[in-house]
Image: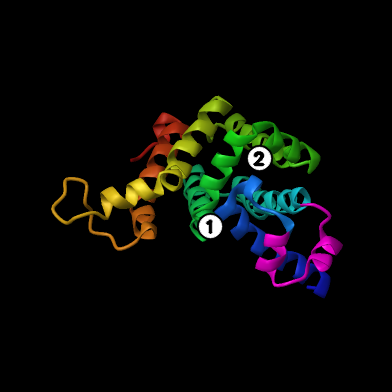
Amino acid sequence: MGKSKSIENRIIQAAAKVFLEKGYEGTNMTLIAEAAGIGRPALYYYFKTKGKVFEELYASQVKSFTPGLLEIISQDAPAEKKIEQFVEAYFEQLITSPELPFFILREIHRDSQFFSQTATKLNLDKYFTDVLDAYRKEVEAGHLKDVPVYALIMTMIGDLLSPFAFKPMIETLVMGKAGSAWAFPVNSFKDILLHWKPFVIKNMKSLLLPDEKTSD
């Protein structure tokens, strides 16, 4: 990796923390430069506006995951295994940055058009189209059910993102006082997610697998 690319990555990683803490409106170039440990002139050399920083952050999150998702869907493996790997990959990505889903949800509520325009500008629609095309091929082969796209999205958001969106409440209830009706023997939010993951896999299999292939 070249020095220029290394600095860009450092800026993006630092900016992610600032955006997560301050939100888009509360973030400025000075805060990003300070978090990255560089001067404002150096920051402006790589990114002219905080919008450009945000676009690159958004794109990097999508692009870092989507190629792996396409690989999972396209591989020669049983549908059950693909679903397991799909959920595993998502959890691994989200556990790395547990605040990111809440940030995305907050910013979508702030300005949903901004997210849509950013995705279009960065040509990210193609990634999602490729994923959908791969899914359609699995349906045509009889490996997966033909589920409406909105059902797929809502199930994924509900099962995968809601624990992160409600993280403080879940931690308070599940990791609360011993003896409470909600309490569960876990030591961290990550532990909660690891216990939740098998249920997500089961839900996704129930949604996507043909009835004769659903074994649990």
Q: Amino acid at mark 1?
A: Ser
CA–CA distance in space, label 2 to label 1 = 23 Å
> Mark 2 near mark 1, Cβ–Cβ under 8 Å?
no
Q: Which residue is mark 1?
A: 97
Residue 209 point in image, percent of width and height: 46, 35
Residue 147 point in image, percent of width and height: 53, 27
> Which residues make up the magenta segment?
30-49
The residue sitting at 66% across, 40% down in the picture is 131
The residue sitting at 24% across, 54% down in the picture is 176
Image quadrant of residue 119?
A: top right
Q: Which mark is residue 131?
A: 2
In which quadrant is the C terminus drawn?
top left
The residue sitting at 27% across, 51% down in the picture is 174
Give the mark nearer the N terminus: 2 vs 1.
Answer: 1
- 213 left or right, relative to 1: left
Residue 58 point in image, percent of width and height: 68, 49
Q: Regarding mark 1 in the picture, which secondary structure is present there?
A: loop
Q: Residue furthest right?
A: 45
Tell me if I can see residue 146 in this picture.
no
